[in-house]
């Protein structure tokens, strides 16, 4: 790149990253805090565990947890650090997609559309704080290296993505299949010898060593390299009260279809997909990966967590940008009608960009998880007012567990595989809660007012602290119950209190 191109790209990276951090630095929600606690415990020398002394792989993103553990030694605010990493990853991902377009000699509007729409995708922005932005950066980096024919680098990047999230292996399969078919086609002995010679052996050796190291370590340490959360989320998805990935995608489409400018984006994306397959465009492997990911997650039957839809965004943005690119193709003589067509497309894209910015501004003013303030307060209270040996039972252990730093009993089964087995199709989380309370007998319960488990807590335990939702901008109230009086409690003499007093 020329110096002014590098300067422009650097300015873009700093400007977009800073803007996203300023707008979404507050973007906290429950699930990533489970990973934050793994990282925190590892950094503090308690091992790669959620609960000290209990080796369960309850995070779906081990490499991200290890990365955060390294950061934790220098930056203690892991939730904010994760948002910074996410913002930088979105900006860098957009630049890599732009670079791929440059290598493919795509029309300038295609690259500009990628730079404009990728970091402003509300689906991606809602995943900030999780591993998704960094995971997608590794995926895009793998595809970028593949496009440049740096195959060893591509293999290493896709394996790093797979260690961040196991579904990165889907991209590996797509790229490996494309690599083989593009060289062998109809197989013959000569072609197979050529394929063996062209294989990126250095990258394969490095990637195999990384995968083998993780499999050996996780099997010895946890008993299995497969996260316990996969089974838990499949069980959650099978519950009648839950929603699976496929129906959740339909609901997401319906929600976005309420805004007319997304209809324009969808039209451009469909046009781009048709254009790519008609012209055998080099972007086809990325588009195929998007489809394979969608089908795989529908088949897994996991719950419709919002961040599970983030890996669909690169393919959607690329399809949209290809739609923009094929719309502005015109004859060299630039007849008047072609100029009108170009102006119409440019005006439509500019309008779409302005409306997208407006939508992002609206989202940035939202609180992704309205429970965060009350969960944080509950966790901090438990940290300050309970013995360090106490066990806490509650439905969601992310935010509460991170700030409480106590042994947590998870009623949703994310860190307790035995609890996940109770999540049958006709079961409810209250059923799982009652089973977990009877099985593990936690010293304290954190229960939401109005659920069935609260009746059990009121019957067998003593309420010691109320957290009124209106104090924290939340619609529900929570009560902390003490169930085991053998555990010393510095606040035993304080009596029953309410944070609303």
Image (cartoon, helix red, strand yellow):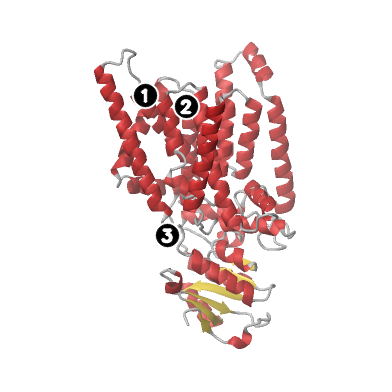
Q: Determine whether the residue tagged by mark 3 lies in a helix, strand or loop.
A: loop
**What residue does disc 1 label?**
326
Which of the 4 image quadrants contains residue 449? bottom left
Apparent side of residue 202 relative to residue 109 in the rendered image (left or right):
right
Nearest to N terminus: mark 1 or mark 3 = 3
Which comes before the other along the chain, label 2 or label 1? 2
> Could you tell me how far apart the alpha carbons at marks 1 and 3 are, in whole angstroms?
44 Å
Q: Residue at x 45, y 20 (%)?
A: 280
Query: Alpha-carbon distance for marks 2 and 1?
Result: 15 Å
Q: Residue 44 carries which label?
A: none
Q: Position of residue 278 (x, y in %)?
A: 39, 21
Q: Position of residue 349 (x, y in %)?
A: 34, 34
- Nearer to us: label 1 or label 3: 1
Residue depicted at 72% across the width and 39% down the height? 212
Identified at 43% across, 25% down, the residue is: 108
Q: Sort mark 2 into few (<14), some (14-19) or many (20+) by Cα contacts within 10 Å.
A: some
The reply to whether discs 2 and 1 touch (Cβ–Cβ < 8 Å) is no
Classify 99 as above or below 77.
above
Which comes sooner in the sequence, label 3 or label 2?
A: 3
Q: Position of residue 356 (x, y in %)?
A: 37, 43
Q: Element type at marker 2?
A: helix
Mark toward the viewer: 3 or 2? 2
Residue to which mark 3 is pinned:
241
Residue 284, labelled with which disc? 2
Measured as percent of width and height from the top left, residue 65 is found at: 64, 51
| Quadrant housing residue 494 | bottom right
Mark 1 secondary-structure assignment = helix
Query: Which one is in front, 445 or 25?
Result: 25
Quote the CA–CA distance across marks 3 and 2: 38 Å
Callout 3–callout 2 Cβ contact below 8 Å: no
């Amino acid at each position: 790149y020329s110096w002014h191109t590098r300067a422009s790209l650097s300015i873009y990276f700093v400007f977009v990253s800073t803007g996203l951090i300023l707008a979404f630095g507050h973007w906290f929600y429950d699930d990533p805090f489970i990973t934050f606690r793994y990282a925190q415990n590892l950094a503090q020398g308690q091992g790669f565990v959620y609960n000290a002394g209990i080796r369960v792989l309850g995070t779906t993103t081990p490499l991200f947890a290890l990365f955060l553990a390294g950061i934790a030694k220098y930056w203690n605010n892991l939730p904010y650090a994760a948002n910074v990493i996410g913002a930088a990853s979105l900006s860098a991902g957009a630049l890599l997609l732009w670079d791929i377009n440059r290598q493919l000699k795509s029309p300038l509007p295609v690259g500009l559309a990628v730079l404009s729409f990728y970091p402003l995708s509300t689906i991606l922005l809602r995943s900030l704080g999780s591993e998704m932005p960094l995971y997608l950066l590794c995926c895009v980096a793998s595809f970028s290296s593949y496009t440049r024919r740096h195959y060893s680098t591509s293999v290493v990047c896709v394996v790093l993505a797979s260690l961040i999230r196991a579904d990165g292996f889907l991209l590996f399969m797509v790229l490996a299949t494309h690599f083989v078919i593009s060289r062998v086609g109809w197989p013959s002995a000569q072609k197979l010898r050529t394929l063996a010679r062209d294989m990126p052996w250095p990258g394969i050796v490095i990637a195999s060593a990384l995968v083998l190291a993780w499999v050996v370590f996780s099997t010895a340490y946890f008993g299995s390299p497969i996260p316990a959360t996969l089974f838990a989320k499949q069980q959650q998805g099978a519950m009648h009260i839950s929603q699976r990935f496929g129906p959740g995608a339909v609901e997401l489409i319906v929600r976005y279809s309420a805004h007319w400018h997304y209809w324009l984006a969808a039209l451009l994306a469909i046009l781009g997909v048709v254009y790519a397959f008609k012209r055998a465009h080099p972007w086809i492997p990325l588009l195929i990966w998007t489809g394979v990911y969608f089908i795989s997650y529908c088949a897994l039957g996991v719950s419709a967590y919002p961040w599970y839809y983030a890996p669909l965004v690169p393919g959607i943005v690329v399809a949209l940008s290809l739609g923009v690119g094929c719309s502005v193709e015109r004859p060299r003589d630039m007849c008047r009608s072609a100029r009108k067509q170009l102006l119409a497309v440019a005006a439509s894209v500019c309008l779409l960009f302005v409306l997208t910015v407006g939508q992002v501004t609206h989202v940035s003013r939202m609180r992704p998880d309205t429970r965060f303030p009350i969960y944080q307060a509950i966790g901090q209270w438990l940290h300050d007012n309970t013995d360090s040996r106490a066990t806490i039972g509650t439905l969601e252990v992310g935010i509460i567990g991170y700030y409480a730093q106590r042994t947590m009993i998870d009623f949703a089964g994310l860190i307790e595989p035995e609890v996940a087995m109770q999540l049958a199709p006709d079961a409810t989380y209250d059923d799982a809660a009652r089973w977990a309370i009877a099985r593990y007998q936690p010293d304290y319960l954190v229960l939401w007012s109005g659920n069935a488990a609260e009746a059990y807590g009121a019957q067998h335990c003593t309420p010691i602290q109320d957290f009124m939702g209106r104090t924290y901008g939340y619609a529900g109230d929570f009560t902390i119950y003490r169930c085991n009086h053998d555990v010393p409690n510095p606040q035993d003499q304080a009596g029953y209190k309410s944070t609303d007093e």
